[in-house]
Every structure is written in C-alpha cells, then in structure tokens.
C-alpha cells in the first residue's frame, strides 16, 4: 500500500537541457524565438512551487543558464535519483527535448517524463514514444500536482483530465481540465530555485531582475497571435474543445501587490510583466503601480496602444515604468484591419505621443508579413515610421504560421508556406512564408538591414549608454544586441 513516506521523498527534476545540435537555445517563455537574453521561466517555477508546497523534493536543472554541455547533462543523469523529470517544451525545442528524453530513459528507465507547454499540447504524438511519457496539455498546474500524487502513490492516473499518454500502444487523450477560476490560489513562483543574479532584461538595465505574470490571455482576436508559451498552451487546449479563445483570467491587485512586496524584501530591483495584455483598466493598474513606486522598482510591461490614455500614461511615468511593449505590427491601416488588430495607425501614434509626454520609453513590436497585402513598400513605411517616431526600442520579427492560429489556416489554404507545412523557425531571423509579391528572402533582408539601421544609429547608442549603471549591465545588453543582429 502506498505511504506518505513515498510521496514526500519523491524527487522531481525540472530540466532545461543544453542544446545538443549546436543551434541557439529556444526561448521558452515567449516561446517563438531563440534566446536573445536570459529569461526566467516564471510559468515553470509556478508549477515547481505547487509541487514543493505539496512536500515533494524539487530539483531545477537549468543547463543553459550554467552554460553546461551535453556531457554535463549525462554526468548528472548517471548520478541522479529522480522519479520524475519535467520539460517545458516549445516548438523550437521539440527535437532537442525528445533526444534528451531518450537519454533520460537510458539512464533512468523507471522514471516518468512529464511534458508541459504549447509544443506537447499540439504535437502530442511526437512526445509519446513509451508508457513512461505523459503530456500535460494546456494549463498545467493542477494537472501536474494531481498526476504526481498518483505517481507517488502508485495509483493509476489513466482517468485524469488534461493528460495524454500511451495505452496499449495507442495515444489516449483524456478530456481537458477546466480552466483555473482563481489565479490567487496559486503560490508565488519558486524563484529560490534559480540564480536571481543570472537573469536580466536590457530594457530595464538594473538587477536583480525577475519576471511576473498577473493574468492569462487577452480578449482580442489577432489572426497570427501566439501569446506567451503558457497562454498559447492554454489557448490551444481550449480551442480544441470549444472552437474559440479562452476567457481572460486575472489575479486580484491585492495578490499582485503581495508578490511585489515579497520581491522587494528579497532584494529584487527590476520586474518585467509577462502578461499578454498587462494594462486593462485604471482601477486595476493603480494599486499595482503604487506598490511598484513605493518599493522603488523599475519595471516594464506589454500593452495595447488603445489602452494608453492620459491618466494611464501619467501613472506609468510616475511609478518607474521603463518600457511599454506596444504590439504595433504595422502602421498600415489596411493591414491592421486584415489581421484583426482592431487598431489604427492614428491610435498607435497617439499612444506613443502620450507615453513620450510622460517620459515612458516605448518599444514597438513590428511583425513583418502578417498579410498578403504586405509589400516591400509597406514594410519600409512601417519601419521608417518607427524610426521617425523615435521609438526607444524596436523588436522586428517575421510572422510565422503557428498551427492553431487563424493565420496558419490561411497560409495553408493559400499555399504561402514555402515547404507546404509549418516547421519551427526563429522568427527573429528567418521566414518560412512567401507571398506572390513578397518572398521570404526579401522579408529576411528587410528584417536584417532595418535592425542594423535602427540599433547602430549614433542617437540610439548614446541614449542607451546613458542608462547603464554598471559595466556588467552594459555587457549583458551588448550580448543581447549581438544575438539580435546575428544573421545566419
């Protein structure tokens, strides 16, 4: 009979493996690029916190942050005694994670392997090669806890909601789990498992830095959108059953303030909010901004241009906000309408004006190729406009037709995908799309040269140098810029 001893001594290892194919490591929080600068996977650390609170022995092995090799991983596996290994997988990490899973099964054939994230949620078959592998689809927290409880007590997990596994050689996909109704019930992420001095954000230029998330999903319907890796997994699972996006879920401001005050007591100085859409109402933002200002944080967030009004811009400026990521995509109204952005060029420009008025640095996220209406001329107009508006930062990517999005269906139907099918690609460097009037190579060349033009401007370099408080912060930002400008 299973005992409490078995449960509380079960060791669970979260593993971020080294890259074994000499490519860049996948960035696992946003989930659609390779690493530009190191980002803490706050979603995975929340799952770890739940398991730790339940009494399990938790190990967090990040081979990327420690710059460790495949040999280091194999040495670890030879000595390790974990009963469960957990991967947070995204599209760009699929092959790497599956290969490392094979190594785990070689060294620990009786261990269970649990896969979380958008890649196993969608590409379930690829991750299930033997009965010891289990996919947790969508929102993972409660499913992982329940699954580990069953593993620890040798109880069958075959009826658990939200999982897929092999049964008699065939994939069994159990019904989805209901979405979490109360995000406040989740523990704060187990940040003590990682080195807080390793992670950085060149837009904030202060450390120690960490990430926070206060909500899940957004209510808008952009056709191409792949939100953060957590919310995309959540969306993929919900769409599969309901045919539509899930509702937005939010933590209460009081709960968010508690975490901010905890981070201040732990010595953190900078916070990047990972919410798909951080700014919703003035009422919700006010107590959060007050807590950030009171505790002396520099911080940044992602927001829609139409969320920025005079009061919100003032609030951001007064509370230490050092960047707002605006999802611009294009300054062409026809393209914005086609991609269902529900924004206009005028609204975007007005938001930039308001943020600059209150000295809030603006980062513009521009997405090349979101529409067959796109041409070299429209792309150049958008990128030139970003420079003319004197944006503090830009992030230029090329759209990818991620399976599970409306844009993927359009790309398949119209044969815009070069190879005929989606393949994981780093959207900061490469395109797998070609339109009749705009090829993938043309998009890649425009991406590269406008990155060069923007980031190597004397005005940009001088403005950024003034913001560094130490050489180490400058060096981290320089490495991030090098990664961004690498063209291969």
Image: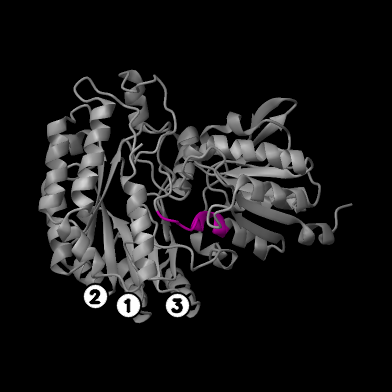
Residue 29 percent coordinates (x, y):
46, 50
Q: Can residue 41 be found in the magenta stretch?
A: yes
Q: Return the residue nearer the eye: 273 or 287.
A: 273
Which residues, given as a range, are shown in magenta?
Answer: 37-46
Q: In the shown orientation, is residue 472 left or right of residue 136?
A: left
Near mark 1 (Cα within 10 A), the count class, few <14, some 14-19 or many ≥20, is some
Q: Return the residue nearer the eye: 351 or 61.
A: 61
Q: Residue at x 71, y 32 (%)?
A: 130
Q: Can residue 276 be found in the magenta stretch?
A: no
**Residue 187 seen anywhere in this rendered image of the structure:** no
The residue labelled by disc 2 is 318
Q: Residue at x 19, y 39 (%)?
A: 336
Residue 144 percent coordinates (x, y):
64, 50
Separation of disc 3 and disc 2 at Cα?
18 Å
Q: Residue at x 66, y 63 (%)?
A: 52
Secondary structure beneath dot 1 equals helix
Instruction: Tell me which numbered mark, 2 or 1, is placed earlier along the sequence.
Output: 1
Separation of disc 1 and disc 3 at Cα?
11 Å
Image coloring type:
one colour
Q: Contact (CB < 8 A) between labels 2 and 1?
A: yes
């Amino acid at each position: 009979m299973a005992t409490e001893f078995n449960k509380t001594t079960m060791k669970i290892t979260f593993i971020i493996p080294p890259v074994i194919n000499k490519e860049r490591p996948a960035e696992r929080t946003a989930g659609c690029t390779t690493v530009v600068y190191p980002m803490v996977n706050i979603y995975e650390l929340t799952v770890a916190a739940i398991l730790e609170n339940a009494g399990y022995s938790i190990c967090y092995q990040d081979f990327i942050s420690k710059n460790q090799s495949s040999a280091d991983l194999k040495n670890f596996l030879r000595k390790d005694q974990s009963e469960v290994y957990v991967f947070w997988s995204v599209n760009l990490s699929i092959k790497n994670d599956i290969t490392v899973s094979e190594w785990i099964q070689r060294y620990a054939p009786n261990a269970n392997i649990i896969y979380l994230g958008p890649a196993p949620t969608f590409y379930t078959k690829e991750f299930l090669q033997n009965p010891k592998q289990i996919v947790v689809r969508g929102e993972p927290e409660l499913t992982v806890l329940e699954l580990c409880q069953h593993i620890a007590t040798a109880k069958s997990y075959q009826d658990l909601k939200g999982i897929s596994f092999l049964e008699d050689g065939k994939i069994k996909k159990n019904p989805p789990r209901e979405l979490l109704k109360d995000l406040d019930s989740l523990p704060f992420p187990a940040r003590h498992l990682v080195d807080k001095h390793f992670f950085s954000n060149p837009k904030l230029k202060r450390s120690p830095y960490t990430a926070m998330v206060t909500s899940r999903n957004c209510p808008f319907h952009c056709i191409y959108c792949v939100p953060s890796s957590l919310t995309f997994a959540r969306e993929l699972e919900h769409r599969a059953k309901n045919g539509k996006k899930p509702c937005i879920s939010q933590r209460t401001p009081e709960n968010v303030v508690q975490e901010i005050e905890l981070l201040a007591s732990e010595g953190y100085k900078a916070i990047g909010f990972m919410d798909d859409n951080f700014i919703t109402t003035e009422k919700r933002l006010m107590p959060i901004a007050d807590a950030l200002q009171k505790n002396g944080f520099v911080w940044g967030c992602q927001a829609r241009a139409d969320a920025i009004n005079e009061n919100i811009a003032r609030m951001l400026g007064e509370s230490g906000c050092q960047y707002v990521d605006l999802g611009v995509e294009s300054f062409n109204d026809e393209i914005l309408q086609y991609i269902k952005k529900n924004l206009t060029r005028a609204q975007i420009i007005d938001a930039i004006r308001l943020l600059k008025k209150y000295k809030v640095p603006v980062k513009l996220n521009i997405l090349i190729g979101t529409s067959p209406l796109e041409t070299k001329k429209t792309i150049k107009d958008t990128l030139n406009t970003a420079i003319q508006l004197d944006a503090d930062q830009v992030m230029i990517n090329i759209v990818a037709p991620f399976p599970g999005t409306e844009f993927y269906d359009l790309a398949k139907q119209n044969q815009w995908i070069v190879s005929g099918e989606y393949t994981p690609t780093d959207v900061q460097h490469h395109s797998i799309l070609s339109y009749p009037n705009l090829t993938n190579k043309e998009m890649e060349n425009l991406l590269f040269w406008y990155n060069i033009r923007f980031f190597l401007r004397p005005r940009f370099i001088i403005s950024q140098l003034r913001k560094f408080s130490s050489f180490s912060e400058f060096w981290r930002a320089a490495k991030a810029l090098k990664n961004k400008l690498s063209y291969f």
